[in-house]
Amino acid sequence: MTFGSDVFRCVIGGSYQRAGETVQMGDTLTRAGGRPWEQVVAGPDGLDEVIIVGDRRGAYPEPTGPNPAWAETVGDLVTRLQADLGALAPA
Protein backbone atom coordinates (compact mmCIF):
# COMPACT_ATOMS: atom_id res chain seq x y z
CA MET A 1 0.00 0.00 0.00
CA THR A 2 1.01 3.61 -0.43
CA PHE A 3 -0.14 6.62 1.61
CA GLY A 4 -0.13 10.18 0.29
CA SER A 5 1.26 11.48 3.59
CA ASP A 6 4.05 10.53 5.99
CA VAL A 7 3.44 7.36 8.02
CA PHE A 8 4.72 6.22 11.43
CA ARG A 9 4.27 2.58 12.47
CA CYS A 10 5.03 0.98 15.85
CA VAL A 11 4.55 -2.66 16.78
CA ILE A 12 2.88 -2.78 20.21
CA GLY A 13 2.32 -6.54 20.34
CA GLY A 14 3.44 -9.58 18.43
CA SER A 15 5.62 -9.27 15.34
CA TYR A 16 5.67 -9.47 11.57
CA GLN A 17 7.93 -10.32 8.67
CA ARG A 18 8.72 -7.55 6.19
CA ALA A 19 11.18 -7.78 3.31
CA GLY A 20 12.99 -10.71 4.92
CA GLU A 21 13.32 -9.17 8.40
CA THR A 22 11.39 -9.61 11.62
CA VAL A 23 9.80 -6.47 13.09
CA GLN A 24 9.01 -6.93 16.80
CA MET A 25 7.27 -5.17 19.66
CA GLY A 26 8.81 -1.71 20.15
CA ASP A 27 10.20 -1.46 16.62
CA THR A 28 9.17 1.65 14.72
CA LEU A 29 9.22 2.53 11.05
CA THR A 30 8.61 5.81 9.27
CA ARG A 31 8.19 6.51 5.62
CA ALA A 32 7.62 9.66 3.60
CA GLY A 33 4.35 10.02 1.74
CA GLY A 34 4.11 8.49 -1.70
CA ARG A 35 6.55 5.66 -0.97
CA PRO A 36 5.09 2.13 -1.05
CA TRP A 37 5.15 -0.19 1.96
CA GLU A 38 6.12 -3.84 1.63
CA GLN A 39 3.62 -6.58 2.37
CA VAL A 40 3.75 -7.82 5.97
CA VAL A 41 2.95 -11.26 7.37
CA ALA A 42 1.92 -11.42 11.03
CA GLY A 43 4.11 -13.53 13.30
CA PRO A 44 3.01 -16.62 15.23
CA ASP A 45 1.59 -14.49 18.09
CA GLY A 46 -0.27 -12.14 15.75
CA LEU A 47 0.33 -8.43 15.28
CA ASP A 48 -0.90 -5.32 17.06
CA GLU A 49 0.39 -2.11 15.54
CA VAL A 50 -0.17 1.63 15.85
CA ILE A 51 -0.20 3.38 12.48
CA ILE A 52 -0.22 7.18 12.32
CA VAL A 53 -0.72 8.93 8.99
CA GLY A 54 0.49 12.53 9.26
CA ASP A 55 -1.43 14.91 7.04
CA ARG A 56 0.82 17.94 6.71
CA ARG A 57 -1.01 19.62 3.88
CA GLY A 58 -1.34 23.28 4.70
CA ALA A 59 1.30 23.19 7.43
CA TYR A 60 3.61 26.20 7.29
CA PRO A 61 6.34 27.10 9.80
CA GLU A 62 5.89 30.43 11.56
CA PRO A 63 9.02 32.59 11.62
CA THR A 64 9.97 32.86 15.31
CA GLY A 65 13.08 32.57 17.42
CA PRO A 66 16.50 34.20 17.29
CA ASN A 67 16.84 33.81 13.49
CA PRO A 68 13.45 34.50 11.85
CA ALA A 69 15.08 34.93 8.44
CA TRP A 70 16.02 31.24 8.47
CA ALA A 71 12.44 30.22 9.33
CA GLU A 72 11.11 32.45 6.55
CA THR A 73 13.53 30.83 4.09
CA VAL A 74 12.36 27.35 5.12
CA GLY A 75 8.72 28.44 4.92
CA ASP A 76 9.24 29.82 1.42
CA LEU A 77 10.96 26.58 0.40
CA VAL A 78 8.06 24.50 1.73
CA THR A 79 5.56 26.66 -0.18
CA ARG A 80 7.56 26.29 -3.40
CA LEU A 81 7.93 22.52 -2.96
CA GLN A 82 4.20 22.13 -2.30
CA ALA A 83 3.43 24.02 -5.50
CA ASP A 84 5.92 21.94 -7.47
CA LEU A 85 4.50 18.70 -6.06
CA GLY A 86 0.97 19.88 -6.78
CA ALA A 87 1.93 20.44 -10.41
CA LEU A 88 3.10 16.79 -10.60
CA ALA A 89 -0.13 15.35 -9.18
CA PRO A 90 -2.34 13.50 -11.65
CA ALA A 91 -5.39 15.43 -12.79
Image: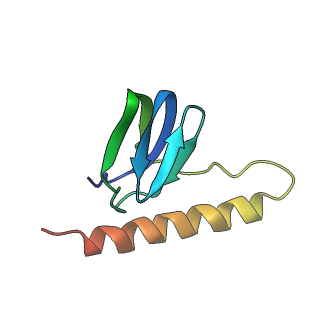
Q: How many marks?
A: 0
Residue located farthest toward the front when viewing the structure as drawn:
44
Residue 16 in the image: x percent, y percent?
42, 40
Q: Is residue 25 above or below residue 62?
A: above
Q: Is residue 84 left or right of residue 78?
A: left
Q: Is residue 21 left or right of 63 when viewed as pictured?
A: left
Residue lying furthest left: 91
28 relative to 18, above or below: above
Which residue is located at x 39 percent, y 57 percent? Answer: 33
Q: Position of residue 19 (x, y in %)?
A: 41, 59
Q: Relative to 69, is 15 above or below?
A: above
Residue at x 35% of width, y 37% of height: 42
- Image point (35%, 70%), residue name: 85
Whether residue 82 sits left or right of residue 68 in the image: it is: left
Image-based side of 89 in relation to 35, left or right:
left
Q: Residue at x 59, y 61 (%)?
A: 75
* Percent position of residue 47, x then y: 39, 29
Q: Answer whether residue 76 is visible to the viewer in this image.
A: yes
Q: Is residue 57 visible?
A: no
Quadrant the C terminus occupies: bottom left
Q: Quadrant of residue 44?
A: top left
Instruction: Examine the image and state in which quarter residue 72 appears.
Output: bottom right
**Residue sitting nearer the eye, 89 or 48:** 48
In this view, 81 is above or below 39: below
Q: Nearer the viewer, residue 16 or 91?
A: 16
